[in-house]
């Protein structure tokens, strides 16, 4: 696609928007400038292609399409059928899955679809059978009461939040924690790694209906073959949330025991992280759960977003191209170079390094909380996010960690040499930042002291690093 065509498309779109609400057009333009100028190291973010972005901005947004391909509750869905079928086909081919459901609007939605598909299969279907009913509407009041109790009385075992698990894997502030009786498995305090024997022991003791694997802040691979064996040994359904590392699975960096698709009963993901698609979710499964998964809407989802499904189809088609595998392997090479650069300069990393796209720095060795470090880095033009580390004494708000990831910078084209420079910039900021104090002199977990001259210098250096790697070089809004 020519630079001209993409520039014209985005410029024209902004002109049309500006005619109605110029402040929105300005904010869209400003967002591009901000993204172009910052060293984005947020592990869960990326830059979708112009084709993916443009596929979302159109009249598909106007269409209701509850139901599934060829079986809708609304008329006139033939074009939505086309894009939904295409997105699902690309997903199946890309991941080697027998079934793909591309309607979830986000990762939490994908997880809810999976949880309720499992509950429908493991709890509701047997209850219907026992009552000799075909549909929940056919149950007596008493049987319905019993079933509702049973649905709300199931167990889930997932990775603990401070070991890198995700809020949607059964934690109380999230709906999943209110639905399930949840227990967590953590990581070995000495190595920071998952201890599979301990997971197996926890599964034997707790006997969960669902064993969940997947993470948002664990810098290593997970052996899904072993996790499946553990699930099978206690009769649990094995679910993997691969939202963070779907791009590494798609790009065949995670294969064999580390590819969740052949091992899990059901796999969920977002489409916008390392997979580099539009914001959204997706569920993959085998034939046993396919019918239940397809009931995601209206079970827990509103009408599908056809414009986003169109963009999913485009992004998944991109991920099937051979250059995506190269991209995925560069993500990991860059994360490892970043980790090595940080360790060489004295940083303390959870597990000492990384096998995937993310690195977790324990900033307590710099005398800082995650919150202080996050802000000091932001002042210096480096965008990261604070994150708890295992057994974090500062909890989930202040934290003791900084999570950094390489999918976005790798999309821009930065390589291992630039990652070493990035490590130098991060280390400089953390090393030169001191914890601050409250007005009464007590230590603060949020305030910090960083010489503005250092922040400015690092900011300039970060900008220089990016000049060789323009973001959306095909898009000129001037
Ligand atoms: N917000 C995403 C992340 O940063 O990991 C997942 O919820």
Image (tube, rainbow, N blue to C red):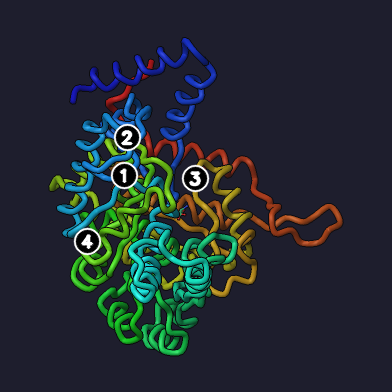
> Residue at image x 35%, y 78%?
236
Foreground tag (1 vs 3): 1
Q: Quadrant of residue 16?
A: top left
N-term mark: 1 or 3: 1
* Residue at image mark 2: 74
N-term mark: 1 or 4: 1
N-term mark: 2 or 4: 2
* Residue at image mark 1: 67
| Separation (CA) of disc 3 from disc 4 | 27 Å
Q: Secondary structure at mark 2?
A: loop
| Separation (CA) of disc 3 from disc 2 | 47 Å
* Residue at image mark 4: 253
> Residue at image x 24%, y 72%?
263
Q: Quadrant of the N terminus?
A: top left
Circles 1 and 3, Cβ within 8 Å, touching? The answer is: no
67 vs 305, nearest the viewer: 67
| Separation (CA) of disc 1 from disc 4 | 35 Å
The disc placed on residue 382 is 3
Residue 112 vertical position relative to residue 422 in the rendered view, above or below: below
Establish whether ligand 1 lies closer than 8 Å to the Cβ of label 1: no
| Separation (CA) of disc 1 from disc 3 | 43 Å
Q: Secondary structure at mark 1?
A: strand
Q: Residues within 10 Å of mark 3 (few under 14, many from 20)?
A: many
């Amino acid at each position: 696609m020519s630079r001209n065509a993409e520039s014209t498309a985005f410029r024209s779109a902004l002109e049309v928007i500006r005619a109605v609400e110029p402040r929105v057009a300005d904010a869209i333009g400003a967002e591009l400038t901000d993204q172009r100028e910052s060293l984005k190291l947020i592990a869960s973010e990326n830059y979708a292609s112009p084709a993916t972005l443009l596929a979302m901005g159109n009249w598909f947004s106007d269409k209701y399409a509850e139901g599934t391909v060829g079986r809708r509750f609304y008329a006139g869905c033939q074009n939505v059928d086309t894009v939904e079928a295409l997105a699902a086909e690309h997903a199946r081919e890309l991941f080697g899955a027998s079934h793909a459901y591309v309607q979830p609007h986000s990762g939490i939605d994908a997880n809810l679809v999976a949880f309720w598909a499992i509950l429908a299969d493991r709890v509701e279907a047997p209850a219907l059978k026992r009552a000799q009913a075909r549909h929940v509407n056919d149950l007596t009041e008493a049987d319905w009461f019993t079933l509702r109790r049973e649905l709300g009385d199931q167990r889930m075992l997932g990775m603990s939040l401070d070991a890198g698990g995700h809020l949607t894997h059964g934690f109380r502030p999230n709906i999943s924690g209110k639905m399930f009786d949840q227990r967590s498995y953590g990581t070995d305090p000495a190595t920071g790694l998952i201890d599979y024997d301990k997971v197996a022991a926890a599964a034997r003791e707790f006997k969960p209906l669902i064993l969940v694997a997947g993470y948002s802040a664990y810098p290593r691979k997970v052996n899904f073959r072993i996790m499946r064996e553990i699930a099978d040994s206690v009769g649990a359904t094995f679910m993997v949330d691969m939202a963070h590392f779907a791009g590494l699975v798609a790009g065949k960096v995670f294969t064999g025991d580390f590819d969740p698709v052949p091992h899990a009963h059901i796999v969920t993901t977002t489409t916008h992280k390392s997979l580099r698609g539009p914001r959204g979710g997706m569920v993959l499964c085998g034939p046993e759960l396919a019918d239940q998964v397809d009931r995601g809407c209206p079970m827990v989802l509103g009408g599908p977003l056809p414009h986003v499904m169109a963009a999913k189809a485009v992004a998944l088609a991109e991920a099937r191209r051979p250059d995506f595998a190269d991209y995925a392997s560069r993500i990991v090479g860059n994360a490892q170079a970043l980790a090595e650069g940080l360790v060489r300069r004295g940083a303390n990393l959870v597990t000492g390094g990384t096998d995937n796209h993310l690195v977790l720095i324990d900033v307590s060795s710099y005398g800082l909380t995650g919150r202080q470090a996050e802000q000091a880095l932001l002042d210096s033009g480096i965008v990261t996010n604070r994150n708890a580390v295992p057994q974090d004494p500062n909890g989930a708000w202040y934290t003791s960690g900084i999570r950094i990831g390489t999918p976005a910078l790798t999309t821009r084209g930065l390589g291992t040499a630039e990652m070493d420079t990035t490590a130098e910039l991060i280390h400089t900021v953390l090393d030169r930042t001191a914890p601050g104090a409250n007005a009464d002199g007590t230590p603060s977990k949020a305030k910090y002291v960083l010489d503005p001259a250092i922040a400015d210098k690092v900011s300039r250096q970060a900008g220089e690093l990016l000049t060789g790697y323009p973001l959306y070089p095909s898009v000129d809004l001037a």
